[in-house]
Image (cartoon, grey):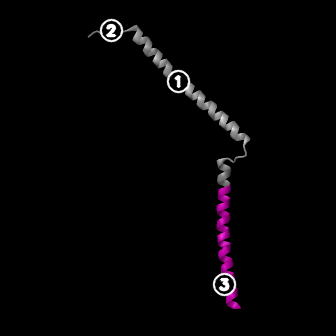
Amino acid sequence: MPQTKSPILDELSRLMTDAAGLAQGVKREAETLAKTQLERVLSTMDVVTREEFEAVRDIAILAREENDRLEARLAALEAKLSGQG
């Protein structure tokens, strides 16, 4: 069966393909611009990075564990002293 080609349909198909590619490019540009603007705004604010936050969180966890150990030690010493008196 012979295929007939329609120049109008071929041109429409090409235009649709070009439009889809253009839309992808515009989307990437918009994402890049939004990311750049957000980074600029965040850099002017007094916020910490995730790495800084996690480092301080780790320090707080260690301090809490040390506090729990010292509290238990103090309770044991107090119990020992109250048993002597």
Q: Amino acid at mark 1?
A: Ala
Residue at 65 percent of width and 57 percent of height: 57
Q: Quadrant of residue 28?
A: top right
Residue at 64 percent of width and 48 percent of height: 50
Q: How many residues crowd around disc 3 within 10 Å: few (fewer than 14), some, or many (20 or more)?
A: few
The range drawn in magenta is: 56-85
Q: Amino acid at mark 3?
A: Ala
Q: Looking at the picture, how far across and down is residue 73, in whole percent?
A: 67, 77
In the rendered view of the protein, which quadrant contains the C terminus?
bottom right
In the rendered view of the protein, which quadrant contains the N terminus?
top left
Between the C-alphas of marks 3 and 2, the distance is: 99 Å
Residue at 66 percent of width and 63 percent of height: 62
Secondary structure of residue under mark 2: loop
Between the C-alphas of marks 1 and 3, the distance is: 75 Å
Q: Are marks 3 and 2 in contact (CB under 8 Å)?
A: no
Total numbered circles = 3
Does residue 71 sit above or below 49 in this rendering? below
Q: Looking at the picture, how far across and down is residue 24, in whole percent?
A: 53, 26
Q: Which mark is residue 4?
A: 2
Lower position in the chain sequence, tag 1 or tag 3: 1
Q: Quadrant of residue 31?
A: top right
Return the residue found at the far left: 1
Taking the magenta stretch, the answer to whether it contains residue 3 is no
Q: Amino acid at mark 2?
A: Thr
Residue to which mark 3 is pinned: 79
Between the C-alphas of marks 2 and 1, the distance is: 30 Å
Lower position in the chain sequence, tag 3 or tag 2: 2
Lower position in the chain sequence, tag 2 or tag 1: 2
Q: Which mark is residue 23?
A: 1
> Which secondary structure is most common in the magenta stretch?
helix
